[in-house]
Image (tube, grey):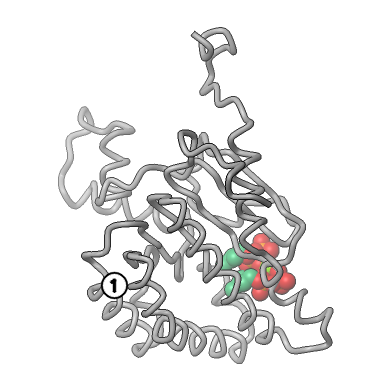
Amino acid sequence: MDINKIDYNKLPQHIAIIMDGNGRWARTKGKFRIFGHQNGITSVRETIETAAELKIKHVTLYAFSTENWNRPKAEIDGLMNLLVNTINNEYATLMKNNIKLNSIGDISKLPIECHHKLKEVIEKTQNNSNTTLTLALSYSGRWEIIEVVKKIIKDNISINDISEDLFSQYLTPNNVPYPELLIRTGGEKRISNFLLWQIAYCELYFSDKLWPEFRREDLLQAIIDFQKRERRFGKTTEQIKN
Ligand code: IPE
Ligand code: IPE
Ligand code: MG
């Protein structure tokens, strides 16, 4: 896949990815699930480096869902260790590509060393300005919506001031645009509680590739597919063309 096939005037401002299929990939190799998670890091690196090269403003990666806390403890521990090590090891990648790290989700639930390492690298990369990489950790869309509702009530917002705009400001305090392209690898065609509010008009792209197999050309392919779509937002084709 040639990067020259990309139309730089029609890039999505925000790409969100459900990185699925690590466990199944490991199985095909006769290995434990954690081997799949470990190999998924290469895919993360290629994805964010490619996104940074294209100057895509926002990439959000679903790394650990609220529901993933229900997995066996050994797998959770393995994932949390991998998270700390990866944030540590990839700090240089973030700096080299001018990438700012961020997170969404209930990160206070993460083991303390994860929480600290994450906060440290978030702070150290805050002045980077090319691409913002947001890791969704201990995250679910419903959790996030309930958090917004709680904040709105706490702030004593009058019922007349409740609007989609206001909700949106609470949801994304840094004015992050909603994802325009959502990619899910691993063959499943579901959302699994990711960014429920934000993806109302997002373009969905499902890949049968298992996450550890996902490479630069797969991301480019998804972007090219996105660029061929007509986004109508409820209007007619004729309205869009004029
Ligand atoms: C995605 O891969 C990574 C996480 C959910 C943390 P999975 O671990 O869900 O892999 P499969 O879907 O079981 O193959
Ligand atoms: C979604 O994958 C969560 C992440 C990629 C972090 P899951 O593997 O947890 O989703 P389900 O269980 O197949 O819906
Ligand atoms: Mg899965």
Secondary structure under the numbered disc 1 in the rendered image: helix
Residue positioned 55% across, 55% down in the render: 193
Q: Which of 158 and 230 is in front in this view?
A: 230
Give the labeled residue for mark 1: 122
Q: Nearer the viewer, residue 100 or 30?
A: 100
Could you tell me residue 217's position as x and y percent? 66, 56
* Lateral position of residue 9 relative to residue 98, left or right: right
* Lateral position of residue 146 relative to residue 237, left or right: left
Residue positioned 66% across, 65% down in the render: 20
Q: To which quarter of the image does residue 104 belong? A: bottom left
Q: Is residue 99 above or below residue 228?
A: below
Could you tell me residue 122's position as x and y percent? 29, 72
| Ligand 1 position by quadrant | bottom right
Q: To which quarter of the image does residue 47 belong? A: bottom right
* Lateral position of residue 105 relative to residue 232, left or right: left
Could you tell me the amino acid type at mark 1? Ile
Residue positioned 29% across, 31% down in the render: 163
Q: In this view, does 19 lie above or below 171?
A: below
Could you tell me residue 54's position as x and y percent? 46, 51
Could you tell me residue 74's position as x and y percent? 61, 92
Q: Nearer the viewer, residue 62 or 110?
A: 62
**Mark 1 surroundings within 10 Å by alpha-carbon count, few (fewer than 14), some (14 through 19), many (20 or more):** some
